[in-house]
Image (cartoon, helix red, strand yellow):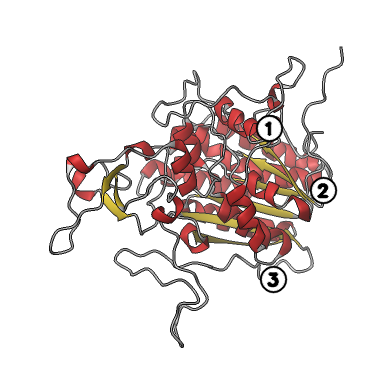
Amino acid sequence: MTHPSPPSLPPAKFGIVDLFAGPGGLDIAATIMKDEGVESIGVEWDDATRATRAAAGLLTTEVKDVAALGPCDPSVVEATVLTGGPPCQSFSVAGSRKGHQALDDVLRLATRLADHEDEASFDVAWKEVKAETDAMSDDRTGFVLQPLRWIMEAKLKRRRPYEVIVLEQVPTVLPVWNHFVDILRRTGYAAEAHVLHTEDFGVPQARRRAVLIAQFDPENVRRKVRFPEATHQRYRKGAERLPPRGDHDEGFLFDDVEPWVSMGDALRATRTTDFVMVSNYGSGGDPKNRGRRESEEPAPTITGKVRRNRLYHLRKDAAGEIVIRLEDELERLSAQEAGLLQSFPAAYPWRSTDVAQQIGNAIPPRLSLHILSMALFREPPQEKWFTLLKEWRPEEEPLLSADMPVAVRRSAPPQTSLSAPSSASGRPRTGVSAKSWAK
């Protein structure tokens, strides 16, 4: 009996290998751009998240661990683009002594991986770095170095460097990305890193991401790297929402941007009345600090604890202040609704019982369209891509076969409870599921 070959990235103009790929926030954007020669394959540790990817028809490597693969592996050897969001929370805790120490360790170890001219010297450096990170009490510290290993091995071992690199994470990781920028410039890349606001790009959620974009250009490493430019209004507490573009008076200052996309806009199919969301995000557990957002505002940052957010009918007193009444409480967000606030399609096939964590850890697909378009094509995304993303549906699932590799099998019908945590028995040494432990 013949067995199908393990999944591998097909040759493409822009073949993406996505490290710590999660449920597919970047890969689904790549699927939307397929007609422009974009293909992608993700490396993902967590079985529940892999089930979501399989149901969405996303290509995923059979090997789960980023550390067990490299750019020369047959499944990813055709990749011309490296992307990823390595879990970096061990050094991203603001004000934490341990966090600052971990940050210093990462910057020091990254420097040891830079400027090697041959694979032998790099292998010696990597062996030393890996031994040190393996001995650390928090193994997440070493995750952020994996993309740098892949970058260096592509150049020194595969002898074909990645043409484009895109890395993203929480804003406190920006010092790491800036350090990577210096290393990448010495390696032949034009590179820059900036913090982007998701609502600037039509995501119905206020969220910030530190993004690095690098393009291989040995003769021009100091040139400017174009980043996405805002298409929508930035959210600020107390600010008025702009009128739709086209309704502006002559001489209006913000004629180049649309109003922010609100929770009400995104959830119009399921929430027909105005509501207020009461969020624990950033409250430190203090009820007095709980943020409140009306349905005409973007959502607060969607995290793996999204089910803790409470929704109420919007009610105000004579002074215009929000009034919260227990009898006005509404059903909490469903998996589909939480995904919509991350700009995933309504039909996205979330799987397993840790869906909230999958959604909270993902990069918003709409933001991915903006980032990938500027990184790959150096121009804004096509307007039709946003329509395709909104209307996206998974292809009809094939019948299961015992001969089908686990990495490409479709999962059972969805179980989309947002409240139950993953039942993983052990913490991975590497892989995106480590984000679940950190966020």
Q: In screen coordinates, is 32 left or right of 319?
A: right
> Which label belongs to residue 223?
3
Quarter of the image with the N terminus in it: top right
Which residue appears at 73% of the width and 14% of the height? 402
Q: Position of residue 415 (x, y in %)?
A: 49, 25
Dot 2: within a 10 Å radius of its alpha carbon, few (fewer than 14), some, or many (20 or more) residues?
A: some
Which residue appears at 49% of the width and 57% of the height? 198
- Marks 2/3 in contact by CB < 8 Å: the verdict is no
Q: Is residue 112 visible?
A: no
Amino acid type shown at disc 3 = Arg
| Element under disc 1 | loop
Q: In screen coordinates, is 159 left or right of 103?
A: right
Amino acid type shown at disc 1 = Glu
Q: Earlier in the sequence, mark 2 or mark 3?
A: 2
Q: Quadrant of residue 211?
A: bottom right
Q: CA distance from mark 1 to mark 3?
A: 45 Å
Q: Earlier in the sequence, mark 1 or mark 3?
A: 3
Q: Which residue is mark 2?
A: 12
Dot 3: within a 10 Å radius of its alpha carbon, few (fewer than 14), some, or many (20 or more) residues?
A: few
Q: Is residue 295 visible?
A: yes
Amino acid type shown at disc 2 = Ala
Residue depth check, mark 1 versus mark 2: number of the one nearer the observer: 1
